Image (tube, rainbow, N blue to C red):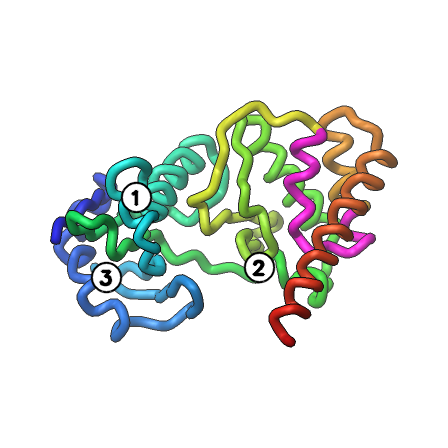
């Protein structure tokens, strides 16, 4: 068994404690999410850390992540550093740890600072917090900043943006970072980045209108397109869930 890891320089004093996390991961801290991947809030060196343990890859991906492509944990770490360097919100990256054998990657972990937040984007439609339009416009500007820096977040879905009230402003933090593309983003491609958010028509109108303003596009056409893409995506999701329920 080999271990590949990297700890950011400012957290080097925590390296021994960080490297102990995988051995006791299932028994430590507070469970945040259980599913395909598992996330726990774990304390180390007096810091609250968010530790994501990725599901063991299938045989093909075990080999791919060992020899051809960075693992999900390493990509998340590197992309977080890139985002932070551009001033784009994401929980502060701390380290990644990857275990592998000659047959490829077996376990991998991405570690970041735990962030206090008020909502995930997925909560907005039901919660309807005060200042909803302000939040949506801020979120749209946040996404536009990514696009302006030639970053296209492939997993721009409702659970992957944390929203926090900080003073008089709203802050946004991207999570689940391992799937990104780095390329020029046209206004139409950028608008399409919003279609997986499960937004309703009122939310779509605000988002599309703000993105049209930022990109110098026609607000009516942007709203029509985003509404169409969102409805089509939501219908595919509904049919997929119905098939699974049979």
User: Taking the image as drawn, is residue 52 in sight?
Assistant: no
Give the SS element for disc 1.
helix
Labels 3 & 1 near each other (Cβ < 8 A):
no
Q: Where is residue 129 in the image (x, y as percent from the top left)?
A: 70, 62
Q: Assess whether residue 182 is covered by the magenta stretch.
A: no
Give the SS element for disc 3.
strand
Give the SS element for disc 2.
strand
Q: Position of residue 54 (x, y in %)?
A: 35, 57
Decide if residue 241 is on the left or right side of residue 36: right
Residue at mark 3 to residue at mark 1: CA–CA distance: 28 Å
Kindly identify which residue carries mark 1: 65
Q: Which label is found at residue 214?
A: none
Segment colored magenta: 188-204
* Closer-to-camera residue (56/46): 56
Kindly identify which residue carries mark 2: 120
- The image shows residue 37, relative to residue 26, as above or below, that is above
Q: Which of marks 3 and 1 is nearer the N terminus?
A: 3
**Numbered disc in front, either 2 or 3:** 2
Residue sitting at x 12%, y 53%:
1
Residue at mark 2 to residue at mark 3: CA–CA distance: 25 Å
Residue sitting at x 55%, y 35%:
152
């Amino acid at each position: 068994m080999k271990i590949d890891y990297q700890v950011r320089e400012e957290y080097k004093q925590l390296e021994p404690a960080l490297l102990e996390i995988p051995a006791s991961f299932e028994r430590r801290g507070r469970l945040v999410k259980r599913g395909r991947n598992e996330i726990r809030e774990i304390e180390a060196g007096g810091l609250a850390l968010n530790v994501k343990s990725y599901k063991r890859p299938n045989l093909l991906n075990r080999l791919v992540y060992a020899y051809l492509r960075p693992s999900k944990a390493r990509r998340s770490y590197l992309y977080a550093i890139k985002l932070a360097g551009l001033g784009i919100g994401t929980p502060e990256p701390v380290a990644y740890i990857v275990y592998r054998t000659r047959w490829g990657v077996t376990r991998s972990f991405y570690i970041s600072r735990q962030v206090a937040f008020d909502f995930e984007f997925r909560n907005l439609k039901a919660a309807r917090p005060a200042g909803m339009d302000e939040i949506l416009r801020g979120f749209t500007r946040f996404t536009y900043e990514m696009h302006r820096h030639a970053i296209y977040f492939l997993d721009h879905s409702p659970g992957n943006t944390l929203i926090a009230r900080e003073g008089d402003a709203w802050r946004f933090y991207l999570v689940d970072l391992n799937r990104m593309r780095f390329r020029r983003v046209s206004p139409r491609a950028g608008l399409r980045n919003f279609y997986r958010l499960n937004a309703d028509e009122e939310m779509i109108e605000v988002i599309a209108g703000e993105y049209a303003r930022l990109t110098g596009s026609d607000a009516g056409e942007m709203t029509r397109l985003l509404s169409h893409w969102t409805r089509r995506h939501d219908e595919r999701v509904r049919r997929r869930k119905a098939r699974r329920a049979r």
